[in-house]
Image (tube, rainbow, N blue to C red):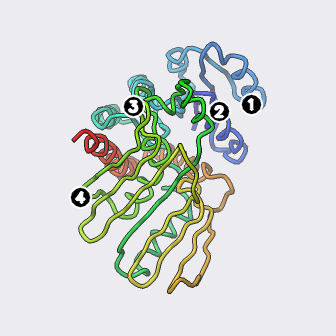
Amino acid sequence: MKLAIIGSGKIVQDFLTITKDLPQIELEAIVGTTRSKETLGELKKIYGIKNYFTDYEQCLREDTIDAVYIAVPNHLHFSFTKKALLAGKHVICEKPFTTDYQQFLELKQLAESKQKMLLEAITNQYLENYLEIKKKLSSLGDIKLIECNYSQYSSRYDAFKNGEIAPVFDAQKGGGALMDLNIYNIHFVVGLLGKPLGVHYFPHMENQIDTSGILVLQYKEYQAVCIAAKNSDAPVRSVIQGETRSIIVDSPTNVLTSFGIYQNNQLLETISENSHPHRMYQEFVTFEQLIQNKDFVSMQKRLKHSESVMWIIDQAKTSTQS
């Protein structure tokens, strides 16, 4: 896969550290803003990227590039993905796919019409530990409750309280606890249980943005609760409670370092199956394979999952307005 990386922020710099372990991915280009030109040059040199651009559309005109990885701020995902699909490129887009459900549906339809791969970069769906959790689910007995808590005091929260609004705290730019941290919890639950019957969101609002919130997903015979906070800290933990056993994950739902199986509050087994220490490795191994094989059947399955997540986001936002 000949890849162009769109963005030069923290997530991109994190991803670049594992590219040495992904020889099947050729780094053709990296794209950033004019003010990040120096950073682009440094990253190009350090990681052996063939070229860099400060003009996104110029990059998309390069015939050597067959796929783009979009890792720009949330509110730009839709426009950047649409441009790439129209230019005939396969797209890997960071979570959340878009800030709006209808935008997602438009991108899905466009990818299908262009016969191009469209994939959401969401780490937990590809981690071996997550796949093991899915296998172990039936051994817990009837599922009764799932609770995921991803709370992390934001390094930008103090500035936010003083009136400095970074994108992660800007509602117009897809910020907030729901779109940032809770999105991982939502993917975690939907990958296990599918689309819920009902959605209710109870946010703590400050300056028109949810700095924390509790999302309740209603299923026929059980509930899932997704908690996220950027204004406070708490132990990061996920619990799946079955009638006879439970699973406890003592790491964020985007990392899933390991998990334990419990019965009567006693640890029976600890499972740690991730083959690589970095959370992003396995998803990019899979992306490369899907794009190389033009596996549109698998793409449709993954888009169905992402569509359920985007529907939940849409319903959550609507529920706070009623």
Q: Where residue 122 sits: x, y (%)?
A: 49, 48
Task: Tell me the tag on residue 208.
Answer: 3
Give the label, 4 or 2, closer to the camera: 4
Question: Mark 1 or mark 4, which is nearer the start of the sequence?
Answer: 1
**Residue depicted at x 64% and y 35%:** 10
Under mark 1, the amino acid is Gly
Q: Which residue is mark 2?
A: 27
Task: Tell me the tag on residue 250.
Answer: none
* Residue 145 can be seen in this image: yes
Q: Please tell me which residue lies in front, 228 or 306.
A: 228
Task: Tell me the tag on residue 48.
Answer: 1
- Is the C-beta separation of discs 4 and 3 under 8 Å? no
Q: Secondary structure at mark 1?
A: loop
Q: Secondary structure at mark 2?
A: strand
Q: Which residue is mark 4?
A: 197
Q: Which image quarter is the N terminus in? A: top right
Question: Mark 2 or mark 4, which is nearer the start of the sequence?
Answer: 2
Q: Residues within 10 Å of mark 1 (few under 14, many from 20)?
A: some
In screen coordinates, is 132 left or right of 53? left
Under mark 4, the amino acid is Leu
Q: Secondary structure at mark 4?
A: loop
